[in-house]
Image (spheres, coloured by chain):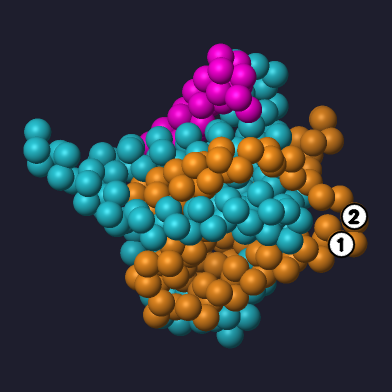
Amino acid sequence: MNSDWLMGLLGGGLIGTAAAMFLLVNGRVMGASGIIGGLVDRTGWHAWQERTALIAGLIVVPALMTMASGVKPTFLTDNLLLIVIAGLFVGIGTRIANGCTSGHGVCGISRLSVRGIAATIFYIGAGGLTVVLFKHILGVI
Amino acid sequence: MRAFFGFIVGGLFGAGLLISGMTDTQKVQGWLDIFGDWDPTLAFVMGGAIVPMAIAWRLVPGRAPVLGGTFDAPPDPVVDRKIIVGSVMFGIGWGLVGLCPGPAIASLSFGGFGGFAFLIAMIIGMALAPRAQTMLEHSRAAR
């Protein structure tokens, strides 16, 4: 098997283990957009401690890992306009849809939620069409 | 204790995102590039993540969370316009630069100014979402 796929499977296993732990121990669904969004619009302030602690772990552990390995695995575009537009779309979209890749994708599909499966089909479909349009037709990304 | 486990969960989540390649925007765009040079890695990430979570869901009925309280109530299982419009918007943003909310936070320490700018724009988008939702509801009422 391709080593990238193996790392994907391993990393995915860690993501799923994290989500399983958050559900069974804290009783919460591990959705990144919901955890941040609830702090932004104050609907999740009653659970601010576990939310901010989760975000802290999500920042600190990859920081330590990249410091130790020296690898900086991001190849983000330097087109700031594109970044800002994309950020706004991701922020508005995930809140309106009430979930993103972790919430609808991982937590939703794993309990065979129709909403989660539908959301995943729509965001992957829209993402795929966006890459086709902006990369292969317009050549912007 | 809730915060302690929150931190552990966030750390595991971040390690998983980093190891799997989800913070690598080129890899994510490669996975979305169905008509180009398609990179199937993210299917393995999704598969690897869904298995432990599927087991966890099976353990929920008849139990309470270890730290007490109740489990989050499952949402109303209706596929409405919000789910579709929101997910399409999210997908467009995800395709444009290759970042979704989890990896956007996980790559904060090494994502440079661009990564920081994305996160700020995403947070502003989240703050604007209730207004966007009202517009969406009004446009439906007008029809």
Q: On the rendered structure, is A123 left or right of B79?
A: right
Q: Name the residue under label 1.
A: A67
Q: Residue A2 carries which label?
A: none
Q: How far apart are marks 1 and 2 (CA)?
A: 5 Å
Asked whether, in this view, residue B50 is left or right of residue A12, the answer is: left
Residue under mark 2: which chain is it in?
A: A
Q: Is residue A4 above or below residue B110?
A: above
Dot 2 crowding, Cα within 10 Å, few <14, some 14–19, many 20+: few
Quarter containing the N terminus of chain A:
top right
Kind of residue at badge 1: Met
Among the chains, which one is orange? A
Per the image, label 1 sits on a secondary structure element best described as helix
First to last magenta residue range: A118-141
> Looking at this view, is B69 or B117 the one in front?
B117
Residue drawn at (49%, 64%) of the image: A36
| Colour chain B appears in | cyan
| Residue at which label 2 appears | A70
Give the amino acid at mark 2. Gly
Q: Most prominent secondary structure in the magenta stretch? A: helix
Query: Residue B68 in magenta?
Result: no
Circles 1 and 2: CB distance less than 8 Å? yes
> In this view of the protein, which residue sits in the foreground, A93 or B40?
A93
Residue A118 visible (yes or no): yes
What x and y, as percent, mark residue A11?
72, 49
Chain name for mark 1 = A
Picture quadrant where residue B70 is located: bottom left
